[in-house]
Amino acid sequence: MASIRNSGEVSPAGSAYQRPQVVRALFEAAASLERQERFNRRKVELPKNAGGPWTEDED
């Protein structure tokens, strides 16, 4: 039996947590959430007009 991360609970041998496809899907979901968090954090730090079109004066 494997331990469920951070809870201390032990999952049964036939549990979905023992299936490689489920483990990979959970890993990818966690990675996606972390990427989104980094993106949002960086977006807040950028200037207000970052990524926008240039004005005639700037061009």
Image (spheres, rainbow, N blue to C red):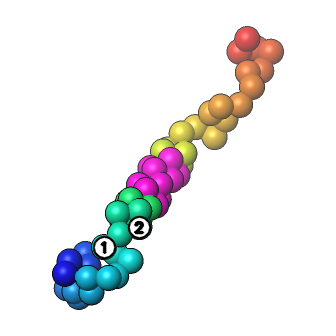
Q: Does residue 19 show up? A: yes
The residue that appears at 73% across and 21% down in the rendered structure is: 54
Q: Nearer the viewer, residue 9 or 46?
A: 9
Q: Does residue 34 show up? A: no
The residue that appears at 41% across and 62% down in the rendered structure is: 21
Q: Where residue 13 sits in the image (x, y, percent)?
A: 26, 82
Q: Is residue 55 rendered to the left or right of residue 1?
A: right
Tell me if residue 36 comes above or below residue 23 in the rendering: above
Circle number at residue 2:
none
Give the spatial CA distance, label 2 vs label 1: 8 Å
Q: Nearer the viewer, residue 7 or 38?
A: 7
Is 34 magenta? The answer is yes
Q: Where residue 38 sits in the image (x, y, percent)?
A: 44, 50
The residue that appears at 54% across and 39% down in the rendered structure is: 46
Q: Amino acid at mark 1?
A: Gln
Residue corresponding to mark 1: 18
Write down the quadrant of residue 19 in the picture.
Answer: bottom left
Specify the principal SS of the magenta part: helix
**Mark 2 residue element:** helix
**Stretch in magenta:** 28-41
**Mark 1 residue element:** helix
Q: Where residue 9 sits in the image (x, y, percent)?
A: 23, 88
Residue corresponding to mark 2: 22
Packing grade of label 2 (10 A; few <14, some 14-19, many >=20) is few
Q: What is the count of numbered marks?
A: 2
Q: Amino acid at mark 2?
A: Val
Q: Quadrant of the N terminus?
A: bottom left
Tell me if residue 55 comes above or below residue 29 in the rendering: above
The residue that appears at 58% across and 37% down in the rendered structure is: 47
Whether the residues at callouts 2 and 1 have beta carbons within 8 Å, the answer is yes
Q: Quadrant of the C terminus?
A: top right
Q: Is residue 44 rendered to the left or right of residue 26?
A: right
